[in-house]
Amino acid sequence: MAKVYGVLKQASVPVLTASGKKSEVRAVDPQDTQVQVDRVKDLQPVKEAVRLYCKANAEKKAAEKAVAKHAEVLRTYVGELRTVNAVAGDYQKSYRVVGDRRDKRIHQADVSQQDRWNPQKGMDLKTLRSEDATAFDAVAEEETVISIKDEVLKNRTLRVELSKALEGALGVEGIKKYFTKETTYVVRSGMDKLQFTLPAQQKLVLERGFKQAADAVKDASIDAE
């Protein structure tokens, strides 16, 4: 059980959304409140954790951009090298690009070609095939894939309707042959708030049966004036 020392004080300045409207988010100023957790004996003050989190998050974003930039340089180099060699009859799927030796490490990167393809944006493949079926069929084949629409996956009512329709059309054994069928339970909507006013028995069932997802964390830093 976490023990909190000090007072979590609501900030006097309201939290605003990106459009300038008042947000439902509640701002709190920890005032360097120290939180003691049984399993974590050396926990930094909350305010310091906020600063370090935002700093690390900014560094992570910068690092991700740098990774993407340098990776593209390697892709270009290896791509041209692979093409030249392949045209000469020496195809190589993967290359290890060796960099310099620094900080007691040999820096190197593996660059591998992937046999995965997506249609070009805006391209009608049926039209393309109609122009030269022989050439098209030499490089591509027809594949029928049945997918469930996103709106069905996101809509519980439609999912239930689909389940009943499939069971009616295929029967229980047919469902087993082509699909996995599972009965599950989901927590009712609004329980994030309702959990605090539940009767004792209901709260016990909730705590025994379900684990609430951890709070989401994101950088919300703003420039100081």
Image (spheres, rainbow, N blue to C red):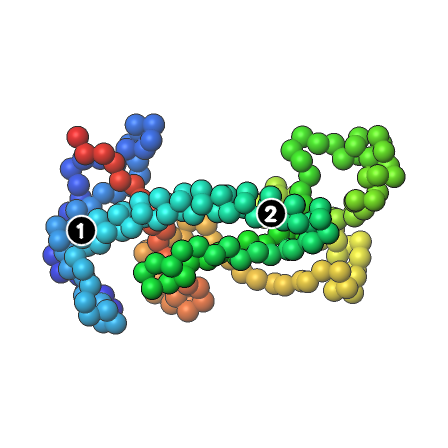
Front residue of this view, candidates 112 and 79:
79
Amino acid tagged 1 = Lys
Seen in the image, is 114 located left or right of residue 202? right
* View extreme (bottom): residue: 39
Residue found at x 71% / y 32%: 123
Seen in the image, is 46 located left or right of residue 212? left
* Quarter of the view holding residue 95: bottom right
* Quarter of the view holding residue 133: top right
Indicate the secondary structure of the residue bearing disc 1. Answer: helix
Front residue of this view, candidates 2 and 167:
2
Q: Which marked residue is nearer to the observer: mark 2 or mark 1?
A: 2
Q: Position of residue 111 (x, y in %)?
A: 55, 53
Residue found at x 25% / y 36%: 222
Indicate the secondary structure of the residue bearing disc 2. Answer: helix
Q: Position of residue 183 (x, y in %)?
A: 61, 63
User: Can the viewer see residue 2 in this picture?
Assistant: yes
Q: Earlier in the sequence, mark 2 or mark 1?
A: 1
Q: Position of residue 113 (x, y in %)?
A: 62, 52
> The C terminus lies in which quarter of the figure?
top left
Q: Position of residue 66 (x, y in %)?
A: 40, 44
* View extreme (front): residue: 88
Rendered image: mark on residue 47: 1
Rendered image: mark on residue 81: 2
Dot 1: few (<14), some (14–19), or many (≥20) neighbours within 10 Å? some
Amino acid tagged 2 = Leu
> The N terminus lies in which quarter of the figure?
bottom left
Seen in the image, is 29 located left or right of residue 198? left
